[in-house]
């Protein structure tokens, strides 16, 4: 079978229950959730007033039409997300629950996507990454996955340029554009106000994103995550993040990378030749020598 299914043991589920759930979340996050159809998901983030990502998640509408929204979120920060949402709750008639103990999340790609059960939905960030499912625990034992399956999913994720929080960018550290939320359908630029909207709108309209997560390729070897990416002259232009099978994701200063290209400077990381992807405005010939 081309593809596979794995349990994402670093993901969990938070539920926002009640008739006011959509209106409550709509005023907080970067994407529109009022218009979600049954079984549909949207990528979104909860930002600080300064516009930095505090949490990101997939917002899912149940199939049965019950008045709730489910958040496919980081397992490590699920409890903190519940606390933050309760902080904003005020008089909203919603109940916010951490369902980490009762529900898990799985991913299916290629032919494996059809094997998903539970609340299955298309990953809204990129159709090529496949589908996900929110499932009551225990998840099927066959979904535990082996090392090869997990590497295959990482190759797919990284190859599509889909970053992972606390691996490719840090909560409380990255702005929405830096983590490519705009490129991954995580921002609705036409919805009403939400926390951090002014910063997001200013960056969008001025085109002032200084850094981006960029796909990276290597002719050979694997650099260490966290290693600096620098020109042969020694100027640091970025830092390596996820790495697998001669590809990776890196956070890159766009202005410095473009300047390096303009003067013909090559890029290296851990002594290895590096090529930066061109989809965020970098030329495809930004290759190492």
Image (cartoon, helix red, strand yellow):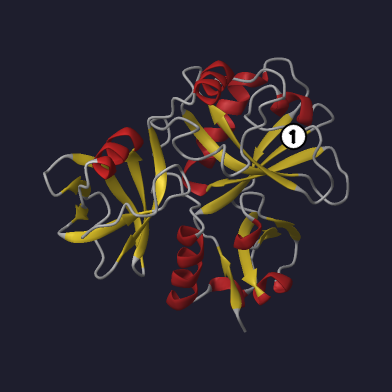
Residue 203 pos. (x, y %): 50, 23
Residue at the limit of the structure toward the right, as seen here: 65
Residue name at image x 57 percent, y 65 percent: 7
264 displayed left or right of 22: left
Between 197 and 232, the one nearer to me in the picture: 232
Query: Residue 191 appears in which quarter of the rendering?
Result: top right
Q: Is the residue 123 above or below the residue 254 in the image?
A: below
Residue name at image x 64 percent, y 47 percent: 99
Between 193 and 218, the one nearer to me in the picture: 218
Q: The N terminus is located in which quarter?
A: bottom right
Judging by the rendered image, the residue that carries numbered circle 1 is 33
Q: Is residue 19 visible?
A: yes
Residue 138 pos. (x, y %): 64, 66
193 displayed left or right of 84: right
Residue 114 pos. (x, y %): 73, 72
- Label 1 crowd bin: few (<14), some (14–19), many (20+), radius 10 Å: many
Between 40 and 119, the one nearer to me in the picture: 40
Residue at the limit of the structure toward the left, as seen here: 233
Q: How many marks?
A: 1
Residue name at image x 45 percent, y 77 percent: 148
18 displayed left or right of 179: right
Between 61 and 266, the one nearer to me in the picture: 266
Query: Residue 20 appears in which quarter of the rendering?
Result: top right
Residue name at image x 72 percent, y 47 percent: 41
- In the structure shown, which secondary structural element does the residue marked by tag 1 occupy? loop
Q: Is the residue 76 above or below the residue 176 in the image?
A: below
Query: Residue 32 appears in which quarter of the rendering?
Result: top right
Residue 93 pos. (x, y %): 78, 23
Residue at the limit of the structure toward the bottom, as seen here: 1
Q: The C terminus is located in which quarter?
A: bottom left
Q: Is residue 169 visible?
A: no
């Amino acid at each position: 079978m081309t593809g596979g299914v794995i349990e994402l043991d670093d993901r969990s589920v938070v539920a926002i229950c009640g008739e006011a759930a959509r209106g409550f979340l709509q005023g907080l996050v970067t994407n529109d959730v009022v218009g979600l159809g049954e079984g549909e998901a949207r990528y979104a983030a909860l930002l600080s007033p300064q516009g930095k990502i505090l949490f990101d998640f997939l917002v899912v509408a149940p199939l049965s039409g019950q008045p709730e929204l489910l958040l496919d979120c980081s397992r490590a920060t699920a409890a903190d997300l519940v606390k933050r949402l309760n902080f904003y709750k005020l008089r909203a008639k919603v109940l916010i629950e951490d369902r980490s103990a009762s529900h898990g999340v799985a991913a299916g790609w290629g032919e494996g996507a059809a094997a998903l059960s539970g609340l299955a939905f298309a990953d809204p960030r990129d159709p090529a990454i496949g589908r996900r499912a929110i499932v009551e625990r225990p998840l099927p034992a066959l979904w535990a996955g082996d090392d090869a399956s997990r590497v295959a999913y990482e190759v797919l994720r990284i190859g599509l340029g889909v970053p992972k929080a606390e691996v490719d960018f840090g909560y409380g550290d990255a702005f929405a554009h830096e983590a490519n939320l705009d490129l991954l359908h995580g921002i609705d630029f036409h919805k009403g106000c939400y926390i951090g909207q002014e910063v997001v709108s200013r960056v969008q309209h001025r085109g002032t994103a200084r850094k981006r997560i960029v796909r990276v390729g290597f002719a050979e070897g694997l650099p260490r995550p966290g290693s600096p990416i620098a020109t042969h002259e020694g100027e640091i232009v970025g830092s390596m993040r996820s790495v697998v099978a001669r590809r990776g994701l890196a956070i890159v200063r766009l202005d410095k990378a473009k300047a390096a290209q303009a003067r013909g400077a090559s890029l290296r990381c851990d002594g290895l030749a590096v090529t930066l992807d061109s989809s965020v405005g970098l030329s495809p010939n930004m290759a190492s020598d």
